[in-house]
Structure formats: structure tokens, C-alpha cells
């Protein structure tokens, strides 16, 4: 190959590589297109970890917070993980330090041990997922977040075991794509969502795992029906492609004021909120 031909070939080769990378990027982002009916989930605001206010003695993810959300007619977003003896409990953090003052992980304690702890210094205890479902009893829709640090199929299996006979509207979501993959395989009839944020900006470091998760390049395997994204990063290109081009349902988390709600109302259809009473008419 002479120099002239080489000079002509290099730009062509570079353009071809860029085209293939772009095509791969769009392919990896594809959500599920034939989603189950989600109409029962629409038209609601979702109280983040219940309608909580610790200053008033109502800790997050407590039965009291959930009862207040039901009374106000709000949907509920909540977090589920397993105790050491495999019981699904409602708790957000991986450790008990912040809410219970105990330097242990949730998965290190049995249900009996967890039930002995106080939530935020109040009389409220860590509820089981079963207790939560019995309290709500289908009266408001639910966004159930499956908490997973690493792949553990026991968690979605246990969650699903309690939801199979539940008659109220719900969907599931998780930051970990393997939870969605489990649901894709075992419960394709359940509306499922990929939780996401810009992990690289939030954690101030870059890694292949953070990049893959931030850009939702696992969608090709997880096939989410909705994208629940940190509203502050709503202009992320991957989120816009998923929601605007592929029409995955856009869900915002976590809105903490009416001003924030007004800022992102055009970009999302469902809103997870805390710390204020959203004005749906504005």
C-alpha cells in the first residue's frame, strides 16, 4: 500500500470504527419494548422510604412512615434486603450505623436481632417486608427497590415469594442489573426498572464498573421497562436515549423541594420525593 492510499485509508478506517462503536453503544442501551401494563403505577408521587420526618418521630422505612404515606394517598418507594437468616426486611443502608447506631451490616444480624433495634432512637423497629405489605394491602402503588451489593439471587427470589400473592400495584427496581435479569427470567410479567446515577461524579473516581453502570450499558441483558435516574443528572446522554428515543418510562429520584420538582417535571413522568408535599397542579 503506497503512502497516498494509506492517507486515504486511515480516515475511512477511523470513521468505520467510530460508527461501529456508536452502533454498539446504542445496542447495549436497548430496554424492553413490549413492557407490561403500568397504568396502575401512573399519576402518583412516590414517598421516598415512606412519608418520614425523624424530627417528628417518624423514621424512614418505618411502618409509621408508610402508614402516613398511605393516609395521604402517596405511592411508596422502599428498600428490601435480607437478614442473616434470609428474611426480607425493609431497610436502606447496608450498615445499621446511621439509623440504629450499631456498627453491623444488616445481613450479619438475624431477624430477632434486627427487631431488637430502634430506628432513629424512636419506638419504631425495622419492619419485615411481609409486615409492610400487610400494612399497605394494595391501597397505593409501590416501587420496591432490591438492595444488592453483589449478585445474590436469594434476594429477588425472596422478594418475589412475598409479592406473588400480593394484589396491589407494584414494580421493582435495583441498581444491580442482576436483580432485573432475575426478574426477566422468572417474572417477565413484572414491570422492572434500572436505578442509576452518574456514579463517576458522585464518587469522584472512574472505573470500568462505574462507567458501565452510569451509562447503563447492561440494559441489553437486564431489559428494564423504566429508568429511575438521579434527577440532577437528567441530561445524561444514555438516560435521554433510553427515555426519549427508546421510550423507557422516565422516573426521577429523589426530589426534595417544589422547586426541584418544577425544574425536572418536563423530563420525567414519575417522581420519588421526600421532605415536602408536592403540588401536582403546578
Image: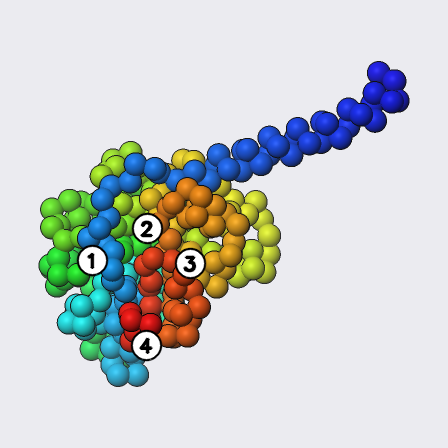
Q: Residues within 10 Å of mark 2 (few under 14, many from 20)?
A: many
Q: Residues within 10 Å of mark 3 (few under 14, many from 20)?
A: some
Instruction: State the mark number for residue 276.
Output: 4
Q: Residue furthest bottom?
A: 56
Q: CA distance from mark 1 to mark 2?
A: 14 Å
- SS at badge 2: strand
Instruction: State the mark number for residue 141.
Output: 1
Q: Residues within 10 Å of mark 1 (few under 14, many from 20)?
A: many
Which of pointers 3 and 1 lies earlier in the amino acid sequence? 1
Which of pointers 3 and 2 lies earlier in the amino acid sequence? 2
Per the image, the residue denoted by label 3 is 267
Which of pointers 1 and 2 lies earlier in the amino acid sequence? 1
Which of pointers 2 and 4 lies earlier in the amino acid sequence? 2
- SS at badge 1: loop
For discs 4 and 3, the disc positioned in front in the rendered view = 3
Q: CA distance from mark 3 to mark 1?
A: 21 Å
- Check the picture and name the quadrant holding the C terminus: bottom left
Per the image, the residue denoted by label 2 is 173
For discs 3 and 1, the disc positioned in front in the rendered view = 3
Amino acid at each position: 500500500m503506497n503512502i497516498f492510499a494509506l492517507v486515504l485509508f486511515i480516515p475511512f478506517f477511523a470513521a468505520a470504527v467510530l460508527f461501529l462503536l456508536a452502533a454498539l453503544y446504542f445496542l447495549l442501551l436497548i430496554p424492553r419494548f413490549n413492557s407490561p401494563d403500568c397504568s396502575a403505577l401512573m399519576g402518583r408521587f412516590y414517598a421516598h422510604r415512606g412519608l418520614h420526618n425523624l424530627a417528628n418521630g417518624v423514621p424512614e422505612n418505618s411502618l409509621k412512615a408508610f402508614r402516613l404515606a398511605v393516609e395521604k394517598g402517596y405511592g411508596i418507594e422502599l428498600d428490601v434486603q435480607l437478614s442473616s437468616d434470609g428474611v426480607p426486611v425493609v431497610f436502606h443502608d447496608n450498615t445499621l450505623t446511621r439509623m440504629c447506631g450499631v456498627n453491623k451490616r444488616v445481613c450479619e444480624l438475624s431477624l430477632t436481632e434486627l427487631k431488637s433495634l430502634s430506628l432513629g432512637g424512636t419506638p419504631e423497629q425495622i419492619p419485615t417486608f411481609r409486615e409492610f405489605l400487610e400494612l399497605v394491602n394494595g391501597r397505593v402503588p409501590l416501587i420496591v427497590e432490591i438492595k444488592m451489593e453483589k449478585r445474590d439471587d436469594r434476594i429477588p427470589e425472596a422478594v418475589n415469594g412475598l409479592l406473588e400473592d400480593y394484589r396491589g400495584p407494584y414494580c421493582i427496581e435495583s441498581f444491580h442489573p442482576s436483580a432485573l435479569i432475575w426478574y426477566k427470567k422468572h417474572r417477565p410479567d413484572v414491570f422492572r426498572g434500572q436505578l442509576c446515577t452518574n456514579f463517576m461524579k458522585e464518587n469522584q473516581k472512574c472505573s470500568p464498573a462505574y462507567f458501565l453502570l452510569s451509562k447503563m450499558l447492561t440494559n441489553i441483558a437486564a431489559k428494564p421497562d423504566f429508568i429511575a435516574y438521579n434527577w440532577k443528572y437528567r441530561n445524561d446522554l444514555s438516560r435521554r436515549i433510553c427515555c426519549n428515543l427508546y421510550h423507557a418510562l422516565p422516573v426521577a429520584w429523589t426530589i426534595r423541594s417544589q422547586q426541584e420538582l418544577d425544574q425536572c417535571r418536563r423530563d420525567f413522568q414519575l417522581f420519588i420525593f421526600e421532605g415536602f408535599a408536592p403540588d401536582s397542579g403546578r
